[in-house]
């Protein structure tokens, strides 16, 4: 997968060199290119923002530099890679595991994180017209406001990269993920334990050392349900009881 980021803070994307994403790059599974938006701001001060039409607080990112930057990046592609443009914004559609899976099936993602009050609206309109509306996504990572889209790019890049074939050691790692599809869909993962069996007088739950796979699977399911009820009652309401019953019969 190719992943481009256009930003006024290229150094903010340094974590893409580390850990899982960094390893995916080193292994040639991910081709990351970070571009400084100011390279396409031609005045002496490399200005990328201006005051909003209609008044109001804050600044708006100018269409000019974004248009030139995105034209250049999109023009650097090859015919076998169709780009998807992702614009992080608190007013976007929610970033979910389902969207991460969808993005992981794309061969080329171009991220356009904004600072200030956002980017001149005409930029999204322009690329919706040029690429098709389904290839330009405005995405939010949650119901809170950040100072810019760079941290959301790091979040989305990691969620997508770990889904790419060959990035995680074993494909099973995805199966029990919170939010992974399947009988445990919509349940959060329960607690986990490792050696030693006793720590500060606290024992590992007996069932986990019983060797009884059916009882272990049922226990994990119950713990997942308990945690989901505590932390995310909204998810319990979406849960399919028939799928849980099937899961119980099959284990
Ligand atoms: Cl994608 N951007 C900003 N600035 N704030 C956010 C966000 C994105 N998602 C949640 N809050």
Image (cartoon, rainbow, N blue to C red):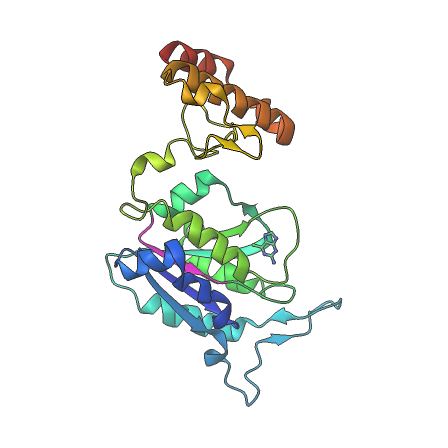
Q: Report the front residue among 145 and 21.
A: 21
Q: Position of residue 219 (x, y in %)?
A: 48, 18
Q: Is residue 11 left or right of residue 80?
A: right
Q: Is residue 105 magenta?
A: no
**Quadrant of the snapshot with the N terminus:** bottom left
Pinpoint residue 150: horizontal percent, then vertical percent.
Answer: 53, 62
Outermost right residue: 56
* Quadrant occupied by the C terminus: top left
Left or right of residue 176, residue 166 in this image: left
Tell me if residue 136 can be seen: no
User: What residue is shown at x 52% (from left), y 19% (from top)?
Assistant: 222
**Residue at left 41%, top 22%?**
209
Magenta residues, start to end: 106-112
Residue 44 screen position, x and y as percent: 55, 90
Q: Tell me, yes or no, if residue 98 can be seen here.
A: yes
Residue farthest to the top, as pictured: 249
User: Left of 116 or right of it: where is 11?
Assistant: left
**Residue 108 lies within the magenta run:** yes
- Name the side, left or right, on which 199 lies relative to 24: right
Total marks in image: 0
Residue 159: percent from left, percent from top? 44, 47
The residue depicted at 55 percent of the width and 22 percent of the height is 225
Above or below — where is 145 with respect to 120?
above
| Residue 229 position by quadrant | top right
> Hey, which quadrant is residue 211 in on the image?
top left
Outermost residue toward the bottom in this view:
44
Is 176 rendered above or below residue 165? Answer: above
Q: Quadrant of ligand 1?
A: bottom right
Q: Nearer the viewer, residue 36 or 82?
A: 36
Q: Residue at x 67, y 71 (%)?
A: 59
């Amino acid at each position: 997968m190719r992943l481009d980021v256009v930003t006024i803070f290229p150094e903010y994307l340094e974590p893409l060199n580390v850990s899982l994403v960094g390893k995916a790059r080193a292994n040639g599974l991910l081709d990351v290119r970070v571009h400084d938006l100011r390279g396409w701001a031609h005045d002496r001060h490399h200005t990328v923002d201006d005051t909003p039409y209609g008044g109001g607080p804050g600044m708006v990112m100018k269409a000019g530099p974004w248009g030139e930057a995105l034209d250049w990046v999109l023009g650097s592609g090859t015919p076998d890679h169709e780009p998807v443009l992702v614009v992080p914004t608190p007013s976007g559609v929610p970033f979910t595991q389902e969207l991460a899976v969808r993005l992981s099936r794309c061969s080329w993602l171009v991220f356009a994180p904004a600072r200030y009050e956002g980017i001149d609206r005409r930029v999204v309109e322009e690329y919706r017209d040029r690429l098709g509306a389904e290839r330009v996504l405005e995405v939010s990572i949650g119901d809170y406001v950040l100072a810019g889209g760079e941290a959301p790019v790091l979040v989305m890049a990691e969620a997508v990269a770990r889904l790419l074939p060959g990035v995680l050691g074993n494909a099973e790692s995805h199966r029990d993920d919170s939010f992974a599809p399947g009988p445990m869909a919509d349940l959060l993962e329960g607690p986990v334990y490792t050696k030693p069996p006793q720590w500060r007088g606290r024992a590992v739950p007996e069932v986990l050392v019983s060797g009884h796979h059916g009882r272990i699977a049922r226990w994990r399911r119950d713990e997942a349900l308990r945690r989901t009820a505590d932390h995310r009652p909204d998810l319990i309401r979406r849960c399919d009881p028939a799928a849980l019953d099937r899961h119980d019969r099959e284990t």
